[in-house]
Image: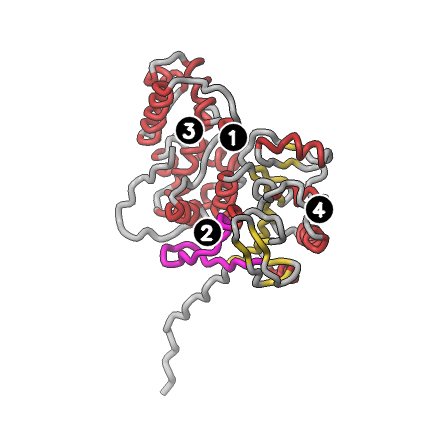
Amino acid sequence: MATPPDTTATPAPARAPSRIALVSFPGIRAFDVSVITEVWGVDRTDRDVPAFELRRTAADPAPIPLRGGLSLTPDRTLAWLPRADLIVVPGLDDHLTPAPGPVLEALRRAHARATPIAALCGGAFTLAQAGLLDGRRAVTHWNLTDLLRTRHPGVTVVPDALFVHDDNLWTSAGTAAGIDLCLHLVRTTHGAEAAATIARSMVTAPFRTGTQAQFIEHPTPHTDRDADTLAAVRAFALTHLAEPHTVAGLAARAGMSPRSFARHFQATTGTAPLRWLITQRIAAAQKLLERTDLALPEVARRTGFGSEITMRQHFATHLSTSPRDYRLAFHHTPAGPGVDTPGPHP
């Protein structure tokens, strides 16, 4: 008698963790080390965040002193970098600190291999020392832009972005913008839901719109009443994303002229009203594509794009992908029926 075939399903092999290398040497900032560790060094697989393997790499295994009486103990040498899917360089306490020669050479080799490299805040100076930013766009803390231009004239310094991407190299503005960049890197490789889960555990926004110009010291451009009014208008727009919005309509809700509204909105958020609205709609669409099986026209309707074609155009412009391909890459089965439209973050 023939043996019946084995119809037991073979479990799919677990996806290998993404490998992240933190490049360390004397002079790096403890805050940036903490940010990198909090984003990629905490196991959140119980909340459907992919597994990460974060390694602290250095030229040798000796403990590295950090400001404030702290120290970092490397667990891998720079020889581990060829295994990394992403390399992250912290900022510096003294932005003119020279990186060790082995670190600079390891970064050059990694870039030649097309490994993505991200530098937080003053870490842009380390990439510039390695010659990686010559002829490329980069950003650093707003208070350091002139210094970066002076010390590395071959770099095209972007004065007001939160983070910049050029030729597989990422740089970020100061301090909190390093969190923005780290979460953005998670979002682009593992989806908006994974980034949002990490952000919730860190009690921070999954993403911020605008530029660092809004954080540069300058006279307050509006009264507290105006700021409260604009916050209320943003909240209204977020809870009514499916509806069409115009600058004139939002300005009327704020009790301002369209021109005055646009000027105050830009000063408060660092971006124009309609650009902010598109960013929020894309974020809402990303979550629906990840969490639900709604048809693409319905996703477009719920998030205010009006049509699948319009939504596709904005995905191509802002995410370099299509809604369909985004869903294929990041879709998760909903935990239960009846998923509501997820609201983005103001």
Quadrant the N terminus occupies: bottom left
Looking at the rendered structure, the kind of residue marked 2 is Glu
Looking at the rendered structure, the kind of residue marked 4 is Ala
* Residues at discs 4 and 2 in contact (Cβ within 8 Å): no
Looking at the rendered structure, the kind of residue marked 3 is Leu
Image coordinates of residue 27 in percent, x first then y, are 61, 48
Q: Residue at x 36, y 80 (%)?
A: 4
From the viewer's side, name the closer residue of 141 and 13: 141
- Mark 3 Cα-neighbour bin, 10 Å: few <14, some 14–19, many ≥20: many
Q: Taking the image as drawn, is residue 114 in sight?
A: yes
Which residue is label 2 attached to? 38
Q: Nearer the viewer, mark 1 or mark 3?
A: 1
Residues drawn in magenta:
34-56
Q: Is residue 236 left or right of residue 164?
A: left
Q: Residue at x 35, y 26 (%)?
A: 231
Could you tell me how far apart the alpha carbons at marks 4 and 1 are, in whole angstroms? 27 Å
Which residue is label 1 attached to? 211
First in sequence: mark 3 vs mark 2? 2
Q: Nearer the viewer, mark 4 or mark 3?
A: 4
